[in-house]
Amino acid sequence: MSAAKVRIWDLPTRLFHWAIAILVPALWWTHRIDRIDLHIVLGEIMLGLILFRLIWGMIGSSTARFAGFLRGPRTMLLYVRGRATGWFGHNPIGGWSALIMLLLLAVEAGIGLFVTDEDGLESGSLSHLIDYDSARILAHRHETIFYILLGFIALHVLAIFYYLLVRRDNLIAPMVTGTRPAPESGEAMIAAPLGRFLIAAALAAGATLALVYLV
């Protein structure tokens, strides 16, 4: 690795990452203190962010695209055996881990739209489409998926510390600064133009508003 720095993560990807890191504990806490009204608002924000990230995963910068970091079983096996190195962005294991957590967040936020509390006073925006009993069943599923998500987050944090302490690879700093030491190949992120960001943001915001206020 040379001393030169290259861009690895764009600003939208980094902001999404740290927004999720803040929202997950905030959502847990608002549920814990029975502020379901605030919990619902934060959940709707989460939904908008997830929709944006899914769109950004198709039209965003090179390291943010799913096609750029999702690899097949053979590549993953070679990476585990230490025979596939030099990855720029997500490594083969980290890429699938990121997608799984994103899908879990999507399912969690999606189910939350149909959930109602025990008194039927605070409900997701789509809860009127199903009966009370179904909404309560989904409330329990909502809680179960949250704990599954916490398990994946714990594995994610452990992996970060493993790379930091064992492999001497700091994964946190690049997610803050957006840059890391350049590989010998000189590879760098290919940034998406501003127009694509505006399209992704508009589509995500429009879909979220439609689900929350129009359906």
Image (cartoon, rainbow, N blue to C red):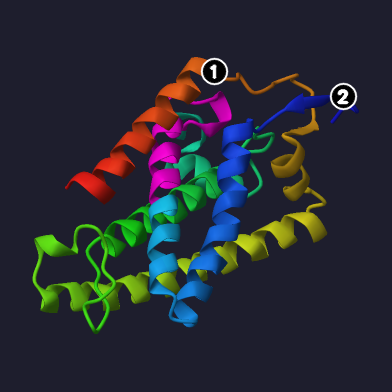
Residue visible at 46% across and 55% down in the picture? 101
Q: Nearer the viewer, mark 2 or mark 1?
A: 1
- In the visual, does 166 lie left or right of 40? right
Considering the numbered disc 1 on the image, is that residue within a helix, a strand or a loop? helix
- In the visual, does 55 lie left or right of 118? right
Other-residue count near label 2 (Cα within 10 Å), few / some / many at <14 / 14–19 / ≥20: few
- The residue tagged 2 is 4
**Does residue 96 lie above or below 22 as drawn?**
above
To which quarter of the image does residue 158 belong?
bottom right
Q: Is residue 78 a member of the stretch shown in magenta?
A: no
Q: For residue 80, say whether it is visible.
A: no
Depth check, front residue: 43 or 179: 43
Depth check, front residue: 69 or 204: 204
**Does residue 122 lie above or below 70 as drawn?**
below
Highlighted range, magenta: 47-65
For marks 2 and 1, the one nearer the N-term is 2
**Does residue 141 lie above or below 104 as drawn?**
below
Q: What residue type is disc 2 on?
A: Ala
Other-residue count near label 1 (Cα within 10 Å), few / some / many at <14 / 14–19 / ≥20: few
To which quarter of the image does residue 87 belong?
top right
| Outermost residue toward the right in this view | 3
- Picture quarter with the N terminus: top right
- Tell me whether circle 2 and circle 1 mark residues in contact (CB < 8 Å): no
Q: For residue 29, say whether it is visible.
A: yes
Considering the numbered disc 2 on the image, is that residue within a helix, a strand or a loop? loop
Give the percent coordinates (x, y) of residue 10.
63, 30
Give the percent coordinates (x, y) of residue 100.
42, 53
**Does residue 18 lie above or below 33 as drawn?**
above
Label the magenta part by its dominant secondary structure: helix
Disc assigned to residue 194: 1
Give the percent coordinates (x, y) of residue 157.
64, 63
Q: What residue type is disc 1 on?
A: Leu
